[in-house]
Image: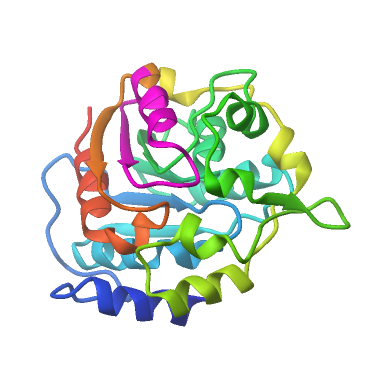
Amino acid sequence: MLNILLSAATVLLAGTTLAGSASSAELPKGAAHNIVLVHGAFVDQTSWQPVADILTKKGYNVTLVENPLTSLAADVDATKQALAKQDGKTVLVGHSWGGVVITQAGNDPKVSALVYVSAFAPDVGESLASLAKAGPPTEGGNAIHPDAKGNLYIDPKVFPSAVAADLPPEIAEHLAKSQLPLSLAAFEAPVTIAAWHDKPTFDVITTKDKVIAPEAQKSFAARMKAQVTDVAGSHASLVVHAKQVAEVIEKAALAK
């Protein structure tokens, strides 16, 4: 999946050099030096690679969390393990299902700010299932179905148009065929902590999103009193609009 997404990034991020290792660039005074990126359902951590490369080039220490997607507790544990390795202030970022994960894991004292990108943002007692049911319905949401083992997928025929309409078709189709399942247990697990109540919060709302309705994203942002940035893109905007997403994360790194 990494090569596919980097191919997309090469095409879509014209003028932006992708970096693989930390730069000696000097960060703004007082900025959090650490960024932890949490991916969503159906994809892996390489979905964050275009954003990670931009931030790494600028001198940030970037960590990509590899969620097992087997339960909320397992994904929160993976995120907490990543946070434990950070030295100092850290911005915690979640895409899609990753928003649920950072909501639960974000009370870590190292976390200086939260960033939600095309993401669900539950309050205490809410789950991905309850937020999805509350609507409004979307093309992508309606295409999520369980397999014989109860694991959830997006219908591969619907995935390209619903999730990644602004990616090249061959890349969107590859992602559709290489989905990673989200367990039903994760889908139904309520959060017991809502870290956004106590942390500076930023939200990238994708206005052409067909997985999480923009209206729902705006509702989450309003409830969190988040600083909002609108991006005219799909649910895959973390790839397509990586530069804009990275800019929001940099703003969060300066939050107090």
Task: Report if residue 74 lies within the magenta region.
Answer: no
Quarter holding the C terminus is: top left
Against 155, residue 104 (above or below) is above
Q: Which quadrant of the structure image shows residue 189?
A: top right
In the image, is 166 to the left or to the right of 84? left
Question: Is 83 above or below relative to 52?
Answer: above
Q: Residue furthest right?
A: 148
Residue 71 visible: yes
Residue 234 in the figure: left or right of residue 82: left
Pinpoint residue 154: horizontal percent, then vertical percent.
64, 56
Q: Is residue 71 left or right of residue 148?
A: left
Q: Nearer the viewer, residue 142 or 26?
A: 142
Could you tell me which residue is drawn at 24 percent across and 40 percent down?
230
21 shown above or below 123:
below
On the question of residue 19 being in view, the answer is: no
Residue 202 sits inside the magenta stretch? yes
Q: Position of residue 122 (x, y in %)?
A: 53, 26
Q: Which residue occupies 55% across, 28% down?
A: 135
Residue 205 falls left or right of residue 24: right
- Residue 99's spot in the image, x, y percent? 49, 39
Task: Tell me where the magenta segment starts and ends, as one range.
Answer: 199-222
